[in-house]
Image (cartoon, rainbow, N blue to C red):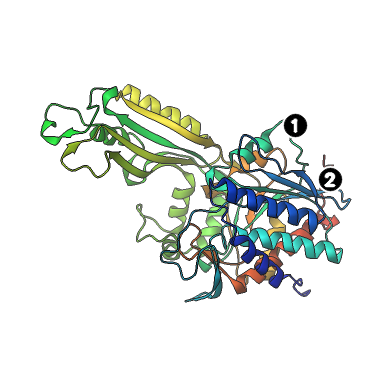
Amino acid sequence: MTAAPDVPHAEALALTRHWCRIRSVRGDAAGLAEQAGAIVDWLGGRLGAEIVNAAGEGGRPPVIHARIDVGARDSVVLYNMYDVMPADAGGWSVDPFEGGTVERDGVGPCFVARGAENNKGPLAGMLCVLERMIGDGRLRTNVEILVEGEEESGSGALRAYLLDPASRVRRGRAALFPSFCEYGGGPPRVYLGFSGIAKGEAAVTGGAWGGPAMPIHSSNAPWIANPARRLVEALSRFGEGPTGMLATIDLDDAARGIVAALAVHFDPAGELRFRGAQRFAVPGDAAALLARVLATASVNVSELSSEPAGGDAVIPYAARARFDLRCPPPLDPSSFVDLLRRRLAEDGLAGVALRIDDSYPGWRFDRAAPGVDALLAAYARTAGATPQIWPWAIGSAPAYAFARHVDAFLIGGAGRGGNAHGVDEFMSLEGYARFLQSIDLWLTAMGDPRMASREPTR
């Protein structure tokens, strides 16, 4: 076996520390602009990349598009993000926007900061690996780099950029979203697709259908309609049982084969620990649980509120529910939104308004798609565990928007992180070195002429 590639661990960690100090919080225009400028300067100054786009439109954070052309026949796409979730210092071991090294039980030394895992650590590592490979003369594939500032807000600008008929993104064999994929310290995962999603709000405003136009005393309950009760009645149409199931699909032969292989070593108890849950809502062994979660379209209610908030002994004048609807490919979440609207109309539930904030379909690709074997081989060299292959992720990503540019959209990378949106977000320092190696190995494999596509790139 050849030696693992020499990787720029110290340089990548230093860049991660530097960029985690930039408060590029979701929706913070100034912080996002500062971080975007820092990335563009690094791409042009350190990588010598061609900056194809660094301008935002309509006040939105820019989709940064850079290109490294080494004169190869083929290209790959590297995608990442520069926005992070909000954080305050409460409960953190270190200032979340200063960062520091913390010893974590069961993990070891970790760098803790907002963005360490999601996703400034992987972003900085990805770019430092590219710099090292270019400097060593080892990069053998052209690279399209896309970095967005709205991943935490739905990736609207990125999707528009990719779906634009005049898009300047060159055709590539595969796209990779470098991330730490040893979830919960378990074996790394490879997803051969992503689920679709629709997110929005169901709301009942009293004055619009006969309820109160202002909060009134609850003694009026026998003769004044309650918007909160109306909303609860409407939500009972949002899927069946405690999981909000809307429909299921029959897994095809390819998916059934992948699930059967996955179930052999799948640990339901470990999955619960990783998810932070106590029990599953449905019975079954590993194979049955996997088939259920992968084949089911469902609605999750994420927030319930009434107005005025915290009212005591009043009939509220409005009630709202935030929801997200997820479905496996090839189902379209918009068709289920239409179904919910029909159910409300057919059952005479006037006054319930559905607002959809975002919706996009899933996407699935073949096990033999470019980039998959290269990622599995990188894991074999770096992760020390047999990776899990899933037919698609139960989570959502705007992978469908990449479909016209690449044959596969992979999220991948060795290494472990955690608490992405919570207190003490971290990345393992030992795992970070293996992450860097895995990205180097993937890029090396994608530049191997024996793996080159027969189709010309644009």
For the question of whether residue 348 can be seen, the reply is no
Of tags 1 and 2, the one toward the viewer is 1
Q: Nearer the viewer, residue 432 or 319?
A: 319
Q: Indicate the quadrant where residue 56 lies.
A: top right
SS state under label 1:
loop
Residue 381 appears left or right of 281: right
Please tell me which residue is depicted at 76% across the width and 50% down the height of the picture.
Answer: 76
Residue type at mark 2? Arg
Residue 224 vertical position relative to residue 145 in the rendered view, above or below: above
Identify the residue under disc 2: 454
Pick the quarter of the image with the N terminus.
bottom right
Query: What secondary structure is found at the residue carrying circle 2?
Result: loop
Q: Mark 2: few, some, or many residues within 10 Å (few <14, many ≥20)?
A: few
Q: Name which residue type carries label 1.
A: Ala
Examine the rendered structure and indicate whether residue 95 appears above or below residue 306. Answer: below
Q: Is residue 186 left or right of residue 139?
A: left
Q: Please name whichever residue, 19 or 339, is drawn nearer the observer in this view of the structure.
A: 19
Q: Position of residue 109 (x, y in %)?
A: 55, 76
- Which badge, 1 or 2, comes first in the chain's sequence? 1
Res 257 visible: yes
**Disc 1 to disc 2, how far (Cα)?**
24 Å
235 to 124, vertically: above or below = above
Residue placed under numbered mark 1 in the picture: 166
Horizontally, residue 452 falls left or right of residue 127, namely right
Residue at coordinates 33% horizontally, 33% vertically from top-left? 237
Task: Work out which quarter of the rendered image holds the C terminus and state it.
Answer: top right
- Crowding at label 1, few (<14), some or many (≥20) Cα neighbours within 10 Å? few
- Relative placement, left or right, of 139 versus 317 is right
